[in-house]
Image (spheres, helix red, strand yellow):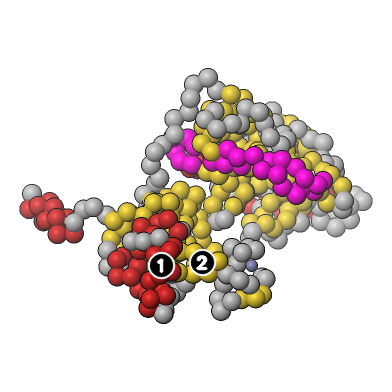
Amino acid sequence: MSLEAHAEELASDLGVDKEEVKSDLENLVNYSVPVDEAKQSLRRKYGDGETGGSGPSSKSIGEVTTDDSNVTVTAVVLTSGRRSIQYNGEQHVIREGELADETGRISYTAWDGFDGDLEPGQTVQFGNAGVREWDGHPELNLGDSTDASVVDEPLDIDAEIGGESTLASLEPGDRGVTVEVQVIECERKIIDGRDGETTILSGVLGDESGRLPFTDWEPHDAIEEGASVRIEETFVREFRGAPSVNVSEFSAVTALSTPVEVTEDAPRLTVREAVESGGLFDVELSGNVIEIRDGSGLIERCPECGRVVQNGQCRSHGAVEGEDDLRTKAILDDGTGTVTVILGDELTARVYGGDLDDAREHARDAMDKEVVAERIAEQVVGHEYVVRGSLSVDEYGANLNAETFAEADDDPVERAGALLAEVDT
Ligand SMILES: [Zn+2]
């Protein structure tokens, strides 16, 4: 039967214009929708059958928008990861991941009523998938009214199947991810979970591309400091503005016999690149310190929460007896942007040239705490530094918690000379 004949049949059944039906039909078939499914979808669209109004239309992923309520898509499953969540007081296991066709990629959530297959690599036709908006983008909701059938049809997609990834390319929201990493730091912690006290692991993972923090919500024996492991079915969340790897009860962890090499270096970025990334766990920046901000030098912290106390008041705990501490907030500028570099007590003591007791004595002698911040400013403002640490970007701005803070050793005069030499050749 030709497309023309199909269109004719539909038009007479539904009592609508044949050319209109034909163009819809052609569209669907061009998006690789099987002709029978396309006809069904058009019957729903033109109001044949008990669904009444307009049923879900077949769309390519690139066409799905947040204005759609229900769609039918045919796509390759890229990733699939399980996660246990709680709503309405009950435990539910959902599956999450990404789908792709020739026109794009889309995230999905499959609720526990959905009984279709979600094997990475399979092409699946999802009939009547709900569309919801997440962070401005459409996402598919697969539920008990979604029917899924595996289609024997390879799609020519431009995306990696399966969730194998390096740490550097992970982003918050990634699901069903597999990594091969070395456990650099690992600490056992007891937290107040949903069902009382529970033990978790938290620390840092590394590979050749970089480092990221992780949390294992269901401690796996193979995860221990120094071990090289393959972790399947993890998901990525944002933690303090940077991606964090989450290991769950559904993750499979296997020890690797060949150690995973971990890079020594943090990626070196310009301030603008780093800030635009939205947050990085480990990054190196360089630039000039142009100013020391208020709240630097000899400060007081709340003994309860560690927040900085101003005029004897904690924002959460009211009037408290503050505890002295040293901190520096330095504005670093590299010509592309600025970031606030935060130095903790040890790094501050180094740039100040004295410890907490020295700072107290200094302030007492001067009868002014500000002298400490002033001396720090004299030491660092106008000098160029290389800083490595963890960058978070939020409504309060871009803050880099420094692990290392070292004066750039190349002398500007020498550098200018080198530049001139380059120009000469
Ligand atoms: Zn407090």
Most extreme residue toward the left is 424
Determine which residue is flagged by label 2.
324
Task: Please state the extent of the stretch shown in magenta in the rendering.
Answer: 186-211
Horizontal side, residue 93 vs residue 66: left or right: right
**Up-down relation of residue 158 to residue 51 (above or below):** above
Asked whether 421 or 190 is in front, the reply is 190
Asked whether 115 or 41 is in front, the reply is 115
Circle number at residue 359: 1
In the rendered image, residue 35, in percent from the top left (x then y), is placed at 73, 38
What residue lies at 21% left-to-right and 53% top-to-bottom? 410
Specify few, some or many for label 2: CA neighbours under 10 Å numbering under 14, 14-19, or 20 or more. some
What residue lies at 58% left-to-right and 28% top-to-bottom? 230
How far is the residue under mark 1 from the one under mark 2?
10 Å
Specify few, some or many for label 1: CA neighbours under 10 Å numbering under 14, 14-19, or 20 or more. many
Most extreme residue toward the top is 257
Horizontal side, residue 413 vs residue 393: left or right: left
In the rendered image, residue 384, in percent from the top left (x then y), is placed at 28, 60
Asked whether the beta carbons under mark 1 and mark 2 sit within 8 Å of each other, the answer is yes
What residue lies at 75% left-to-right and 49% top-to-bottom? 192
**Up-down relation of residue 169 to residue 393 (above or below):** above
Q: Report the amino acid beneath label 2.
A: Asp
Describe the element under mark 1 as helix, strand or loop. Answer: helix
Q: Is residue 113 visible?
A: yes
Image quadrant assignment for residue 31: top right
In the rendered image, residue 251, in percent from the top left (x then y), is placed at 68, 33
Q: In the image, is residue 90 part of the stretch drawn in magenta?
A: no
Horizontal side, residue 115 vs residue 83: left or right: right
Q: Report the amino acid beneath label 1.
A: Ala
